[in-house]
Image: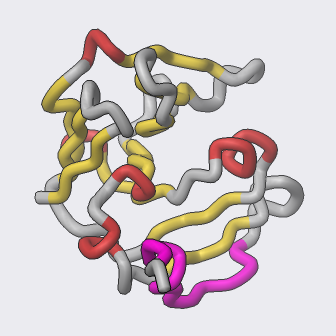
Amino acid sequence: MLRASCHCGAVVLEIARRPRKLTQCNCSICRRYGALWAYCSRSGARVVQGRSSLVKYTQENRARQFWRCKICGCVTHHQRPRGTVIAVNARNMDPQTVADVPIRTLDGASTWKVLSERRQRELFRSPVPR
């Protein structure tokens, strides 16, 4: 079981298993959010705290609903209104729990093709003061 929480801790999600891959998308919204998505089945994820602290943003074409904490503003997850998959923002997880999960880069801005896939531990490292 992995946990993801917003910055202030008001919203906490749990996912049942560690993701096999994380997705970094360059579409206009994901690029602005700076999110790294861990996809799982809707039944494999749940909001365990702060459901009343969530605010929904639905894109113009209503393809996806993005959820964020109304207190601190952190984007927590997105899903299609009637879909079976949920994407939890892995940047809200303990970095050590997903540091070695491969990251695929998705061209959501244009072709919807996978551009690359690699392990990137440095994305989750905290700066070490010298």
The answer to whether residue 5 is seen in the rendering is: yes
Q: Could you tell me which residue is drawn at 69 percent across and 74 percent down?
A: 114
User: Which residue appears at 23% of the width and 20% of the height?
Assistant: 50
Q: Left or right? Give the position of 81 relative to 107.
A: left
Q: Is residue 6 left or right of residue 73?
A: left
| Quarter of the figure with residue 70 | top left
Q: Nearer the viewer, residue 116 or 89?
A: 89
- Is 48 drawn above or below residue 21 in the view shown? above
- Magenta highlight range: 114-127
Where residue 54 sits in the image (x, y, percent)?
A: 38, 18
| Location of the N terminus (image quadrant) | bottom left
Farthest residue to the front: give it.
130
Q: Is residue 2 left or right of residue 119?
A: left
Residue 105 located within the stretch drawn in magenta = no
Q: Quadrant of residue 95?
A: bottom left
Q: Nearer the viewer, residue 47 or 70?
A: 70
Q: What residue is drawn where x is 44% and y is 35%? A: 83
Image x and y of residue 109, in percent: 84, 54
Q: Is residue 63 above or below residue 5?
A: above
- Image coordinates of residue 51 in percent, x first then y, are 26, 18
Closest to the observer: 47 or 11? 11
Is-magenta flag for residue 119? Answer: yes
Residue 7 lies, in percent from the top left, at 37, 38
